[in-house]
Each structure stands twice: as C-alpha cells, then as structure tokens.
Amino acid sequence: MSQFDNVSVVKAANVYFDGKCVSHTVILADGTKKTVGVILPASLTFNTGAPEIMEGVGGACRVKLKGESEWKTYGAGESFNVPGNSSFEIACDEPYHYVCHFG
C-alpha cells in the first residue's frame, strides 16, 4: 500500500541521533500505531521495546541484528523483523525512508 487512509498524525516529530533519524507517529482507525520516517546517511544503533517490522519505502540500508555477525542489505519494498527487547545496527549511505510497524 502506498498510503494510509483515515489516520491521525502526532504533530510533534520523533527526532533521534541529532536529527539523523526523524519520524512521525500515525495512529490508524483501529488504534494501531506506526511510525513513518527517514534515516539520513549514518551508522546508528536502535534499541527496541516491542517487536518491530521495518518496511523500506525508499533508499537502502545495511542491518545487523543483535547477536548476528553478518550485515544484510534491504531496499525499497523489503522489510526486516526486529525482536522486542533487543537492538539493531543500521547503516545508510543514502536517505532510507521507512515505515515501522510495532507489535
């Protein structure tokens, strides 16, 4: 799907790593929360509370999940799963547009 219909958007942005990652929270009609954002060229480490599915919308990134030794590359139309209470490293050489699905 290329858009979310009938949603609420939290006006305040989520800004991480001095602006290298910026997202907005969207709340679907059923109460489901997602974030839609961009990671600028950088190498970052994110910690997770809930499980996440990171869906690539544009650009590309390399990801290494906690406990794994190899990096995997993901682009637009591809996604990766991150367990809850874990972490992942992400490296982007270009802006990486994503939707983060929680739960």
Image: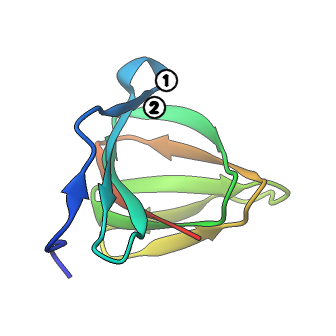
53 and 40: which one is in front?
A: 53
Cα–Cα span, label 1 and label 2? 9 Å
Few, some or many residues within 10 Å of mark 2 (<14, 14–19, 20+): some
38 and 64: which one is in front?
A: 38
Residue at the bottom extreme of this rendering: 1
Q: How many marks?
A: 2
Few, some or many residues within 10 Å of mark 1 (<14, 14–19, 20+): few
Q: Is residue 81 left or right of residue 69?
A: left
Q: Which residue is mark 1?
A: 17
Q: Residue at x 60, y 71 (%)?
A: 81
Q: What secondary structure is found at the residue carrying circle 1?
A: helix
Residue at the front extreme of this rendering: 30
Question: Dividing the picture into quarters, in which one does residue 76 lie?
Answer: bottom left
Residue 13: percent from the left, percent from the top?
Answer: 30, 33
Amino acid type shown at disc 2: Ala
Residue 101: percent from the left, percent from the top?
Answer: 46, 67
Q: Nearer the viewer, mark 1 or mark 2?
A: 1
Q: Is residue 49 left or right of residue 26?
A: right
Residue 85: percent from the left, percent from the top?
Answer: 78, 54
Image quarter where the C terminus lies is bottom right
Q: Which residue is mark 2?
A: 42
Closer to the chain start, of discs 1 and 2, is 1
Q: What secondary structure is found at the residue carrying circle 2?
A: strand
Q: Is residue 64 left or right of residue 79?
A: right
Q: Is residue 92 above or below residue 3?
A: above
Q: Residue at x 28, y 32 (%)?
A: 12
Residue 60: percent from the left, percent from the top?
Answer: 36, 57
Image quarter where the N terminus lies is bottom left
Residues at discs 1 and 2 in contact (Cβ within 8 Å) = yes
